[in-house]
Amino acid sequence: MHDIKRGIRYYVTGNVGVLLLTWFLYAIGNAVTLPYFSIYLKMLGANAVDIGLTYSVSMVAQLMTIIPGGYLTDTIGRRSSIIMGTWLITITTYLMVIAPSWQLLAVFYALSMAAGFYQPALLAILIDSLPPERYASGILVTSVLPQIPWLILPPIGGLLVNKYGLLGIRIAYLFSAVISTAVSVIRHFTIKETLGNSKPRNISLRELLRSYYSLSNVVHLPNDLLTMYLITLITYIAVMPLNTLLSIYVVYRLELSTVYWGGYLVSISYAAYIVLGVLLLFYVDRYRSKLLIVGIIINTLGSAIGLLENVYSTVGYMLLLQIGTQLIMTAIQSELGNRINIDKRGGYGMSLLITFQLIGQTIGSYVAGEFYRISTESLFLMPLILSLSLVVIHLSRSRHNTPPSEQ
């Protein structure tokens, strides 16, 4: 019992505790809005291709700010980057409340994504604040527990949409904006810098612009690190059909109501995701080397189940891809935490990781929209094929990393 209490202390105090709390609060706002964002676009006149394009453009917008965001993380510091970005996201969320057309809603969403330039600072400060032996469980607990609001709140968004239509979803986004304001205030007064004795440097515009050239360093990375970034890229291409079009599929293909989508399917999926995530907390640090392949296999199974195209297979698809993707990224982030020094985690490690995530999301969003227009089965076939390719990549990586005497 003493060991359990001591373990919990790592996750509820200091910066990790602040991140856990504020991510939990963000989830409250997101749970009543994100399941309906594609529907919000459609209500304002967007079609499937427009929706896919909206997500892609937004990913590009964040992609343009993530690399200099990594530079800012290692210069002005984690704290200043996080505070600045969080307030900007709050402002853009208020703008999304009043968007008069899908085009302007897409613009405001893109601005909100661009304001996420501080994501490398969040990942860096999380790793900085954890002991190495707690990397995997720390990443998992701050990813899983903040999702608890998704168990009960999505139906509220669905009820608002069902009862008030467009006005209802605007009310949901106003609620989310108020929550974001609270997050901004909390982070402003509680986040502590983790660069230690390293004094934050002044920003150089030349160095800020030169930070984009860090992408060219990718070709010089060790093969195992390069492979991890490649796996990240493919994983996020594969998961984007779920993130962008599953709500459209459920409401307009399976002909279920928004209440059924948000109140049952999303909540059931997240309930199972949280329960499994909590159970995994006891094992992830011990079996960290196995997380990657387990996550890939789970994604493959989930995509195959989705091809059955019914309500139950849709829940299985959502759940397994959530769990599989989380395990993959927990494994990769933990490895980067071990391999990269604290003063380079923002620019060299986490910003590159997020860059590959965003490139994958950008490609995946657009391709998902184009393929979905041809066949709804692409929602499941696309991640299935890509997950199978990851199995091949992982097996090839494992073979190359095996000493000759063991091959």
Image: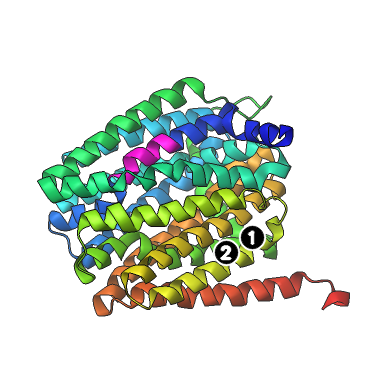
Q: Position of residue 95 (x, y in %)?
A: 22, 38
As shown in the figure, which amino acid type bears the numbered disc 1?
Leu
Residue furthest right as drawn:
405
**Residue in front for this viewpoint, 295 or 191:** 295
Q: Residue at x 57, y 33 (%)?
A: 16
Residue sitting at x 25%, y 35%: 175
Which residue in the structure is indicated by mark 2?
295
Which of the labelled discs sits on residue 291, or is there none?
1
Check if residue 25 falls in the magenta segment.
Answer: yes
Count residues near mark 2 (Cα–Cα under 10 Å), then give few for <14, some for 14-19, many for 20+.
many
- Give the image location of residue 329, x and y in percent: 56, 55
| Circles 1 and 2 in contact, beta carbons < 8 Å | yes
| SS at mark 2 in the image | helix
Q: Position of residue 208 (x, y in %)?
A: 49, 40
Q: Nearer the viewer, residue 201 or 260?
A: 260
Does the magenta stretch mainly form a helix, a strand or a loop?
helix
- In the rendered view, would you say 324 is above or below 304? above
Q: Circle 1 — which element? A: helix
Q: Is residue 292 above or below residue 17?
A: below
- Tell me how far mark 1 sits from mark 2, CA to CA: 6 Å
Magenta stretch, residue numbers: 24-32
Q: Is residue 381 visible?
A: yes
Q: Is residue 163 in the magenta section?
A: no
Which amino acid type is marked by label 2?
Answer: Gly
